[in-house]
Image: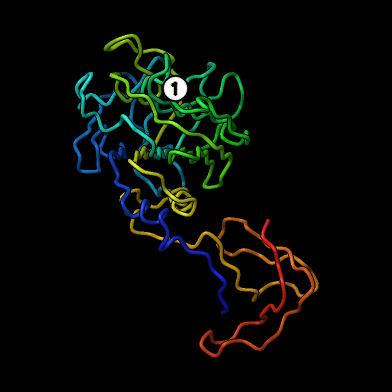
Amino acid sequence: MKRLMLMMLCTGLCATLLNAELIGYWTFDSDTCEDSSGNGYDGTMNGGGYDGADVPTALSGGKSINLSAGDHYVIIDSIAYGAVDDPFNFDKSMTVSFWAKGWPNGQWEPFISKRGENNKGWHARRYSTSSQVGLTLRGTSTQDLQGQTTNASDGFWHHIAVSYNGYRQRIYVDGVLDRVNRATGSVSNTVERVVFGAREYNGENGIGYHSRVRLDDVAIYDDVLSESQINILSDGCDPTAVLEVVQPIAYWTFDNDNPTTNIVKDTSGLGRDGTMFGGAYTNDVPAALAGGNNEFVGLFRVP
C-alpha cells in the first residue's frame, strides 16, 4: 500500500498535543460521579439517576446519567468554591468532550458549564434557541460560537467536543469538525464550579438553566486535542488512552481510487479528499509498499 500521509508528529502543535493532560473524567459506570482521571475531582448528583439501559453504542456498556426528569444536575464539588488553583479555569488551551442525548429544553442551556456569563467562565451548550451546539468562552474575541449541524438535537446519542488553543475555537459533532473560528484572548476565570446539565451563578450553590439531558463519558483536558484524537473519542476510545494516540490528519493511498474519476480519496476518515488535475495512475510502485492497485503520478490539490 502506498502512503502519502500528513502526521502531527514534529511541529509545535504536536508538542502541545503530547503535553495535554486529562484533568477530569467521569464515566458514571459505578453509580457515582467519581473522577476516573485519578485527580480526585469527584462530583455529586443532585436529582437524576444512573442508567445502564441507555448508553452510547460506541461505549459498549457501562452507565449514563439521566438528568431529563427535572431540575437535576451534577456539580464538581471536590473543588472548593473560589479556589485560586481551580484547574478548570482555563487560559488559552482546553478541550471538553462528552456524549449527550436529548436537547436542552431552553435557550442557552448548557451541557457542561463553568458559569459562562457576566464575562466569566465557559459553556458547551445550546446556542440560543437554535438546534446547534454553542461554545461560549468569556474573555475571548468571539465569546459565543455557533455550530452548523443540527444532528445533535435529533434525540439520539451524539459525541460532542469543543476546544480552544488561543487562536482557534472548534466545535465537533460525532468526530467531525462542525465549526472552526479564529479567536484570541484568554478565557476569564470564575469562582463558580463545573456543572453538568446546568450552571452555577450569582454565588455559591445558585444553580439554574437546567438542560434536562442525558450525558455520558465527560472528559476535560487542559490543552487542545487534534481532530484525529476527537475522531477517535467519538468511536468510543477511552479518554485516558487517546493522549497516547497520534493519528494522520490525512492519508492518501491511491490504491482504491477509480482511475476514471478525478477524486483522490482521503482514507484517514477525516474527509480531506483531493482533486486530480491531469496525471495518471500507474502500477509502478515502491517495492517496500508491497503492491497496491494504483500509484498516482501528477498533481492533485486538497481543498
Location of the C terminus (image quadrant): bottom right
Q: Residue at x 69, y 77 (%)?
A: 296
Which quarter of the figure has residue 82?
top left
Residue wearing tag 1 = 68
Q: Residue at x 66, y 73 (%)?
A: 256
Direction from residue 68 to residue 114 in the image, left or right? left
Direction from residue 161 to residue 63 in the image, left or right? left
Is 69 rendered above or below residue 280?
A: above
Q: Residue at x 73, y 63 (%)?
A: 275
Direction from residue 147 to residue 237 in the image, left or right? left
Closer to the camera in the image, 23 or 196 = 23
Q: Residues within 10 Å of mark 1 (few under 14, many from 20)?
A: many
Q: Provide residue 180's location: percent of width, then percent of height.
A: 56, 40
- Helix, strand or loop under label 1: loop
Location of the N terminus (image quadrant): bottom right
Q: Residue at x 20, y 39 (%)?
A: 39
Direction from residue 39 to residue 209 in the image, left or right? right
Q: Provide residue 31's location: percent of width, then percent of height.
A: 26, 34
